[in-house]
Amino acid sequence: MSGTLSGPLTVALVAAGAAIGAPLRYLADRIIQARHDTLFPWGTFTVNMGGSALLGFLAALPAGEVAMAGAGIGFCGALTTYSTFSYETLRLLQDGARFAAVANQLASLAGGLGAGACGFVLARALTG
């Protein structure tokens, strides 16, 4: 990040956002996955789509670096999870659920990009 925020303030904002995003991701994942009797990782998929939409929304706002450090990098960074997505996809392949693994890859990539774009467009529409 360039500009006015740097050093300890930026780190504190990122840490504060992450302190909220990480437990929320864990809880949301567990709640959502418990409602689905399937191998498909609906919990991770859902938090990744929501986080992508929120990050797209934030990116379009004129709020600047303060909001992006805390909410974007910290909260959305901790809420979304590429490593868990990768692990769950590999687990699906190991379990022989090839269709679910490929569906997870394609839906997560297309959905994440689409959710981010929708969030961006929504923010632009709301802020004129």
Image (spheres, rainbow, N blue to C red):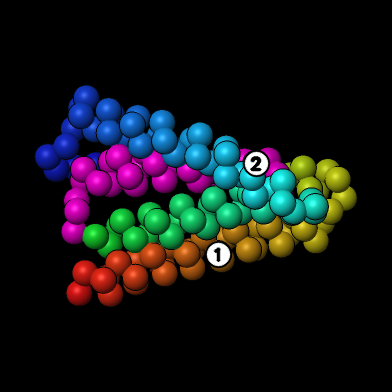
Q: Is residue 105 above or below residue 69?
A: below
Q: Is residue 37 above or below residue 19?
A: below
Considering the whole magenta stretch, tell me its main secondary structure. Answer: helix
User: Viewed as shown, does residue 10 lie left or right of 27?
Assistant: left
Say what secondary structure mark 2 lies in: helix
Disc number lying in front (1 or 2): 2
Where in the figure is residue 118, as x and y percent of width and height? 42, 69
Residue 54 is tagged as none
Say what secondary structure mark 1 lies in: helix
Along the viewing direction, whichever of 122 and 69 lies nearer the viewer? 122
Residue occupying image coordinates x 72% and y 51%: 35
User: Viewed as shown, does residue 124 lie left or right of 90?
Assistant: left
Specify the farthest residue to the left.
4
Task: Write the start and end of the magenta stretch as one range.
Answer: 62-89
Along the viewing direction, whichever of 100 and 75 lies nearer the viewer? 75
Q: Earlier in the sequence, mark 1 or mark 2?
A: 2
Where in the figure is residue 16, as x and y percent of width and height? 33, 31
Which residue is under mark 1? 111
- The answer to whether residue 85 is visible is no
Where in the figure is residue 103, as x and y percent of width and height? 71, 62
User: Tag 2: Cα neighbours inside 10 Å, few (<14), some, or many (≥20)?
Assistant: some
Question: In which quarter of the view is residue 126 placed?
Answer: bottom left
Quarter of the image that includes the N terminus: top left
Residue occupying image coordinates x 39% and y 65%: 119
Q: Amino acid at mark 1?
A: Gly
Please say whether residue 74 is one of the residues in the magenta stretch: yes
Residue occupying image coordinates x 18% and y 59%: 62
Q: Is residue 90 above or below residue 38?
A: above
Specify the farthest residue to the right.
96
Specify the farthest residue to the top.
8
Please say whether residue 25 is one of the residues in the magenta stretch: no
Residue occupying image coordinates x 65% and y 41%: 30
